[in-house]
Image (spheres, rainbow, N blue to C red):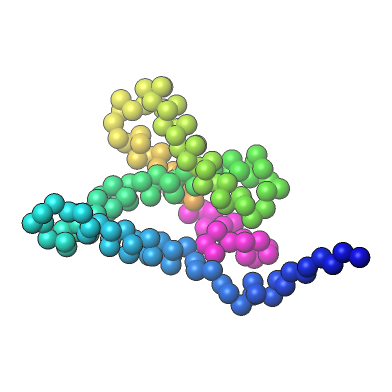
Amino acid sequence: MIHEPTINHTYRHHIQPPNLACRAALLLAVTLGLSAVGLPDGTPAVLGPVTMLQALLSSGLVAAAYLVAGFGYAAPVCRWLCPAVGGNRYWLQLGVGLGTMLWLSHGLGVLGAWRLGTVVAILVVVVGIGLCVADLVRGSLDATRDGRDSLCR
């Protein structure tokens, strides 16, 4: 008779992984620390993190808005294409959302919509963010209510 080892799953209830905000804060702290290393001679070490924070606040917010808008656009696409995916739908939504935003940017560029200026680009992002906020208000991003893993856990 072959003895198969049993797996004790009780440890999962005692150790909670850090949430998404804690992971983001840790990544930011490590990045700030590393930005002070390797600066040119005579440059104060404080200028590395200051420059990195300035770049993060100027360009990072635009990239974050683009990603959140893509997440909003991907919600109906993922519900339509893969309704039975379950808790993994949120991670799929991140990839599908980015692809959707790239597809929208390319399609609107081919149609010549960018000649109208940045108004069209801002409108596309605002509509996507609105879709994401509507999902948050509706509560469809809270997967813990039906027993699945949440996006932020």
Which image quadrant for residue 118?
top left
Which residue occupies the extreme right position in the image? Answer: 1
Is 148 part of what is drawn in magenta?
A: yes
The answer to whether any part of residue 98 appears in the image is: yes
Magenta residue check for 108: no
Residue range highlighted in magenta: 133-153
16 on left or right of 40: right
Horizontal side of residue 149 vs 19, given as left or right: right
Outermost front residue: 1
Q: Is residue 104 left or right of residue 96?
A: left
Task: Tell me if I can see residue 73 in this picture.
Answer: no
Residue 29 image point, x, y percent: 32, 64
Which residue sits at x=47%, y=63%?
20
Q: Quadrant of residue 10?
A: bottom right
42 vs 103: above or below:
below
Q: Quadrant of the C terminus?
A: bottom right
The residue depicted at 17 percent of the width and 54 percent of the height is 39
